[in-house]
Amino acid sequence: MGGGETQLGLIVIAAFGVAILLYGGVARLLLMLGRRLPATDRGFSPWRLAVANLRRHWRGTVVQAVALGLGLTALLLVTVARDDLLDSWRTRVPADAPNRFVINIQPDQRAAFAAFFIERGLAAPRLEPMVRGRLVAVNSQPRQPADYADDRAQRLMDREFNLSWASGLPGGNTVVAGAWHGDSRTPQFSVEQGLAETLGLKLGDEIAFNVAGVPLTARITSLRKLDWDSMRVNFFVIASPGLLDGYPVSDITSFHLPAARSSLATELVRAFPNITVVDVAAVVRQLQDSFDRVARAVQLLFGLTMIAGLAVLYAALSASADERRRELAVMRALGGRGKQLRGALLAEFAMLGAIAGTLAGVGAGAIGWLLARFVFHLPYLPGPGLVAIGMLAGAIGVAAAGWRATRTILRGPITNELLAG
């Protein structure tokens, strides 16, 4: 499991662990506040009776609220919150963001490549020089994949980096440490901040690459933060001008191709057989389809878990049928009518479900925010709709399950006599 996957798993596990404690505490607090509900003019309130019964069995109520809340949290997280996160990501990607990448453009093809687009009424995409090299040493100390414990670091060290050079800071790049080299001819490297953190690189480190068997060495003089959502060509390592002169170079570019002109990609490959065109839009669609299939499987799993929780609630209510029968008989003796007692039962179950659903909505929103903030780096802010959906789903689901489990109590021989008239 890579560092990102580990972080994702730890955040979810920790969040659910904290949720268990918070759900229990908040459920207990809500029950305590519930006794402040006012009575009706005739001194009888189904909601007040519902709260009284939930408070009387507060331990079981808290356990049921926590169990149902966790199940609903998981369901909301992989349905509503997931869609909100995807929408948040889509809004960050410009509508005209590049959706095709082209690699392996040779220096002698640059003019013809630009002319290809101009002849078809499109702007020629900007070509970026690229040299491939493998990182082999840091501060004169050899580095190998086995020197790193992190899976992502091992994968990075086991592949070649795409190196480039530039005098001007590329768009979507921000220097967060050190100083950009500009037009300086002194050998320097600018390294992407995330890569530096993964590989343990810092300002002033001398890093060495192997480029087609030829060494390439320079010091890190700046760290950059990249806007990956721009979908533009980005490089982990950018050299100062002149440092990569004489090394084998090819060009890379990206451009936006409207769906109506998708056939142009095929024409491009026919005109330049040596290049490789990567359809990013197709890759994203495949990833989205795979993600949706996994999400549906997870939804089914958590749905079955939720059904199991409702089944446990049904069994618990059935086991306490005698106790509830006696409670209903006492309330009838104190003046409660059959319609009122039925309303009190439904209110009790709806309130239990609403508590669980409210906790689930808040919990799913909080977990979604944590994932967006610390894993996906998205500006996601959960809306009130998540809580409303959780509250409504919980109230309806638990009320239906609870009523099914207790409706026979109202039809029993003892209560039939007590509720007659």
Image: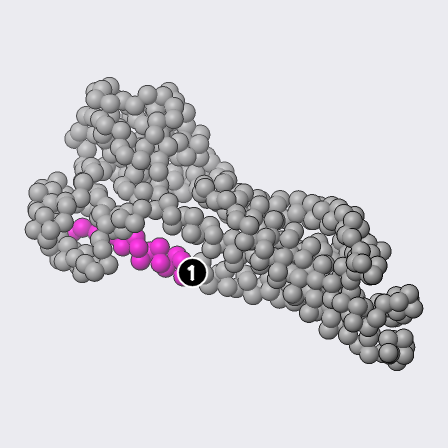
Give me the residue at 42% from left, 60% from top. Answer: 290
Left or right, 7 with reference to 159: right
Give me the residue at 23% from left, 50% from top. Answer: 256
Q: Is residue 15 above or below residue 59?
A: above
Q: Position of residue 222 (x, y in %)?
A: 34, 24
Residue numbers of the magenta segment:
274-290
Left or right, 359 with reference to 160: right
Asked if residue 273 can be seen in this view, the reply is no
Main SS of residues in magenta: helix
Observer-nearest of 338 and 24: 338
The verdict on residue 379 being magenta is no
Q: Position of residue 366 (x, y in %)?
A: 57, 45
Kindly identify the amino acid type of the residue bearing the numbered disc 1: Ser
Q: Secondary structure at mark 1?
A: helix
Quadrant hosting residue 203: top left
Quadrant hosting residue 129: top left
